[in-house]
Image: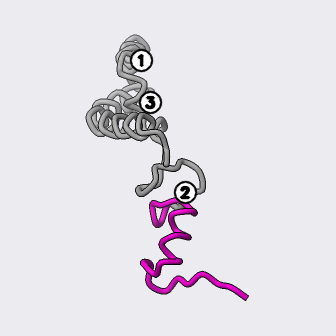
Amino acid sequence: MAKKSAVQKNLKRIMMVSKFEKKRIMLKKIIMNKKLELAERFAAQLKLDKLPKNSSKVRIRNRCGISGRPHGYYRKLKISRIALRDMASSGKIPGIIKSSW
C-alpha cells in the first residue's frame, strides 16, 4: 500500500489540472501564435509561469486504483500488476486465470 500522503498529493494534482486546464490551453495558443507581437506572447508566457506547477498535466502520476502503487501500472485496467494478479487469483476478473503447470 502506498503512502496516503502520496496518493492525496496526486489527487490534488488531478483537481488542479482540471481547474486550470482551459486557462493553460488558452495561454499556450497565444504563445504558439507567431502572428501576434512578441511582447504579447511574452506576457502570456509570464502568466503561464505564474500558474501553479502542479496544474500541469505532466505532473500527474498514474497510480493503482486499489493500492495506490505507482509502478507496474496497466493503463487499460487502471490497476497495478500485483492487484491484477490478486484479483485474477480470486476470480474477480472474467476470462483471466492464473496459470500453473
The tag earlier along the polypeptide, 1 or 3, is 3
Gap between marks 2 and 1 measured at Cα? 31 Å
Residue 29 percent location from the top left of the image: 37, 32
Judging by the rendered image, the residue that carries numbered circle 2 is 73
Task: Determine the secondary structure under disc 1.
Answer: helix
Judging by the rendered image, the residue that carries numbered circle 1 is 49
- Does 81 sit left or right of 6 as displayed? right
The type of residue carrying mark 3 is Met
Gap between marks 1 and 3 measured at Cα? 15 Å
Q: Residues within 10 Å of mark 1 (few under 14, many from 20)?
A: few
Camera-side mark, 2 or 1 = 2
Task: Determine the secondary structure under disc 2.
Answer: strand
The tag earlier along the polypeptide, 3 or 2, is 3
- Does 12 sit left or right of 84 as displayed? left
Which image quarter holds the C terminus? bottom right
The tag earlier along the polypeptide, 2 or 1, is 1
Quarter assignment of residue 21? top left
Residue stretch in magenta: 75-101
Q: Residues within 10 Å of mark 2 (few under 14, many from 20)?
A: many
Residue 4 percent location from the top left of the image: 41, 39
Judging by the rendered image, the residue that carries numbered circle 3 is 32
Residue 59 percent location from the top left of the image: 47, 35
